[in-house]
Image (cartoon, rainbow, N blue to C red):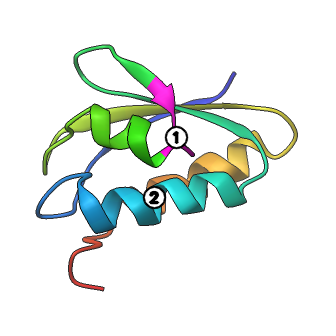
Amino acid sequence: MPERTVTVASSVGLHARPASLFAQAAAKTGVTVTLTSAAGKSVNAASILGVLSLGIGSGEEVTLAAEGDGADAALDELVSVLETDLDKE
C-alpha cells in the first residue's frame, strides 16, 4: 500500500473549509484513502467528520495511504491539495 507523508499548509489546518475540500478531493479519487495524524489516529480521508475529528493544525505532518488501482496518482493529487493553503483559495 503506497503512502505519502505531507505537512499541512492551510493556515487553520484541516478545519472547516480546508477539511471539506480535502475530503471531497479524496472522495473523487475513486480509491480508498486513509489519513493518519501524527498522533497515530487514522480515518477515511473522504469523511469530512473523520478529517475534522483528527484536529490537525497548520504545519502538522500527516500520512496518507491508499489502496486500489491508481493509488499512487491519487496520493500525489491529495499531497498537492494538502500542500496548498486552502484558506486563501
Of the 4 image quadrants, the one containing the N terminus is: top right
Instruction: Judge left or right: residue 31 versus residue 49.
Output: right
Question: Residue at (40%, 41%) from the top-left corner?
Answer: 49
Question: Residue at (88%, 40%) from the top-left corner?
Answer: 69
In the displayed orientation, state which residue is furthest to the front. Answer: 49
Q: Amino acid at mark 2?
A: Phe
Q: Amino acid at mark 1?
A: Ala
| Residue span colored magenta | 43-47
Query: How many neighbours does mark 2 have within 10 angstroms: few (below 14), some (14-19), or many (20 or more)?
Result: many
Instruction: Judge left or right: residue 43 versus residue 32.
Output: left
In the displayed orientation, state which residue is furthest to the bottom. Answer: 89
Q: Identify the residue under disc 2.
A: 22
In the displayed orientation, state which residue is furthest to the right. Answer: 69
Question: Residue at (43%, 21%) from the top-left corner?
Answer: 42
Q: Which mark is residue 45?
A: 1
In the displayed orientation, state which residue is furthest to the top. Answer: 40
How far across and down, in percent of the image, does residue 24 sit?
56, 61
Q: CA distance from mark 2 to mark 1?
A: 8 Å
Could you tell me if residue 83 is visible in this image? no
Q: Is residue 33 above or below residue 12?
A: above
Q: Are marks 2 and 1 in contact (CB under 8 Å)?
A: yes
* Of the pair 54 and 8, the residue shown nearer to us: 54
